Image (cartoon, grey):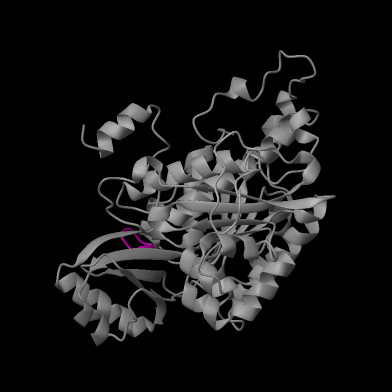
């Protein structure tokens, strides 16, 4: 596995030092290291519209809403006729994250979901497969007789994004297509709130089954919240679901407000720790927050300047590695915050997927934790049962860096890994 961020393996595997042991090469060749995600497989269609277009189709600006398949087809034809379509990409929040995880880690990930049975060159399903990393394993997908789902992203002149979803086969995943043996060996199970929108849909039951399997196997369950309106409409349900199943919750500031009722991002991340063990909160131009738990005996103080916002000296223990609260003898809360890398790209072409990019970085670090634990089980670093390989501070830097790369391109999916030299990155995206 490629290790998170710009790192060299000798920094983390000094096997020549006393007390270190080399790994069994044969064992490493056969031991699987992968992330599993359940997704509503979609093709993202990005287009430019005005407020009148949204009003004509009854679309609430800035929200994500369901479109009838016939309405979606009418919308698509009008967009196509008016030459308003910017691009068509493989989409889905979980699908984006799986792809980015595999690009960053250079490791396999497994996608669970439903895809149309009949795939022809140039259709939506073909575009989804074409724009997905070859390291994302699609062999467990359920074939469906229905068409591929579509997510149309309407971008108004002020840059606001509004989503219209045409379901197609995206909710057809049945519980029989949940491979328990695959989930039990994964580094994490990734799901989204969209999967839990309608209890009558097959994908709802499939998601619950997968979470039950992960819970029994102590595989971390990571939930990305998706959209604020959905969380608001089922707030009590999601709070209970997170408390029962979720290890890490990922959200933006609006989703955090819907979940916790708190507008302050740091306080919202703090409140999320009453439900989950780890919280990732992205706040657009204000960067991102991480909040978690650590045992007091393993807390590490920062060497950076202490900061006070709504919580005093909140970053005091940001050099700690987060743990499950249940694994802490004396649990204490830990936080970190980081502003956008280099202030953010000079020109942001598309904000879609920046949060998914940050989450992919966190999942990469969680996967690296399992890899290192298996490769060198007697390492001093593995004597404590942590959720991640790196400290909160280091993870925030890596997540921030990946978000920058997503923002600097016109796609939520990374086209390559991070640049080898930061100088080349600055030359590419900033004026000299």
Q: Is residue 77 left or right of residue 66?
A: left
Q: Please report the bounds of the magenta region as a residue range.
A: 120-124
The image quadrant where one finds the N terminus is top right
Residue 108 seen in render = no
Residue beneath the point at 59% across and 71% down: 260
Q: Residue furthest right?
A: 329
The residue closer to the viewer here, 72 or 369, is 369
Estimate the x, y position of residue 135 in percent, counting from the top left. Answer: 51, 44
Q: Is residue 103 magenta?
A: no
Our reading of the magenta stretch's main secondary structure is loop
The residue closer to the viewer here, 211 or 117, is 211
Q: Can you say whether 134 is above or below 212 in the image?
A: above
Residue beneath the point at 53% across and 64% down: 39
Q: Is residue 410 left or right of residue 223?
A: left
Estimate the x, y position of residue 90 in percent, counting from the top left. Answer: 39, 58
Estimate the x, y position of residue 147 in percent, counting from the top left. Answer: 41, 73
Residue beneath the point at 33% across and 27% down: 423
Q: Is residue 122 magenta?
A: yes
The residue closer to the viewer here, 37 or 147, is 37
Q: Can you say whether 164 is above or below 132 in the image?
A: below
Q: Can you say whether 418 is above or below 176 in the image?
A: above
């Amino acid at each position: 596995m490629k290790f998170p961020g710009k790192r060299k393996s000798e920094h983390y595997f000094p096997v020549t030092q006393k007390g270190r042991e080399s790994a069994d090469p044969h064992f490493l060749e056969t031991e699987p290291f992968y992330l599993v995600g359940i997704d509503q497989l979609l093709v993202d269609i990005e287009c430019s519209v005005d407020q009148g277009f949204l009003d004509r189709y009854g679309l609430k600006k800035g929200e994500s809403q369901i479109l009838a398949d016939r309405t979606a087809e009418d919308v698509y034809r009008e967009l196509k006729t008016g030459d308003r379509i910017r691009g068509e990409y493989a989409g889905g929040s979980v699908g984006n994250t799986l792809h980015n995880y595999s690009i960053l880690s250079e490791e396999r990930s497994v996608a669970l979901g439903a895809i149309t049975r009949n795939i022809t060159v140039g259709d939506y399903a073909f575009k989804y497969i074409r724009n997905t990393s070859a390291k994302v394993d699609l062999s467990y997908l359920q074939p469906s007789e229905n068409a591929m789902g579509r997510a149309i992203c309407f971008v108004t002149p002020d840059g606001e994004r509004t989503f219209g979803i045409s379901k197609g086969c995206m909710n057809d995943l049945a519980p029989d297509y949940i491979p328990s043996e695959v989930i039990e060996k994964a580094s994490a199970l990734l799901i989204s709130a969209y999967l839990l929108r309608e209890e009558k849909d097959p994908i709802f039951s499939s998601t619950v089954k997968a979470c039950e399997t992960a819970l029994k196997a102590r595989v971390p369950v990571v939930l990305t919240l998706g959209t604020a309106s959905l969380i608001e409409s089922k707030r009590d349900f999601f709070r209970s679901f997170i408390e029962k199943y979720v290890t890490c919750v990922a959200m933006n500031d609006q989703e955090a407000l819907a979940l916790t009722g708190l507008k302050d991002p740091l306080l919202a991340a703090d409140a999320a720790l009453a439900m989950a063990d780890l919280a990732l909160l992205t706040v657009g131009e204000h960067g991102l927050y991480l909040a978690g738990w650590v045992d007091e005996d393993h807390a590490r103080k920062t060497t950076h300047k202490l900061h006070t916002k709504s919580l005093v000296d909140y970053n005091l223990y940001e050099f700690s590695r987060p743990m499950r609260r249940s694994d802490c003898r004396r649990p204490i809360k830990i936080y970190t915050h980081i502003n956008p890398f280099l202030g953010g790209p000079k020109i942001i072409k598309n904000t879609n997927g920046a949060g998914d990019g940050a989450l992919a970085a966190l999942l990469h670090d969680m996967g690296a934790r399992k890899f290192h634990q298996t490769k060198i089980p007697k390492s001093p670093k593995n004597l404590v049962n942590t959720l991640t390989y790196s400290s909160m501070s280091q993870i925030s830097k890596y997540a921030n860096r990946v978000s920058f790369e997503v923002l600097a391109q016109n796609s939520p999916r990374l086209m390559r890994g991070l640049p080898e030299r930061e100088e080349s990155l600055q030359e590419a995206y900033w004026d000299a």
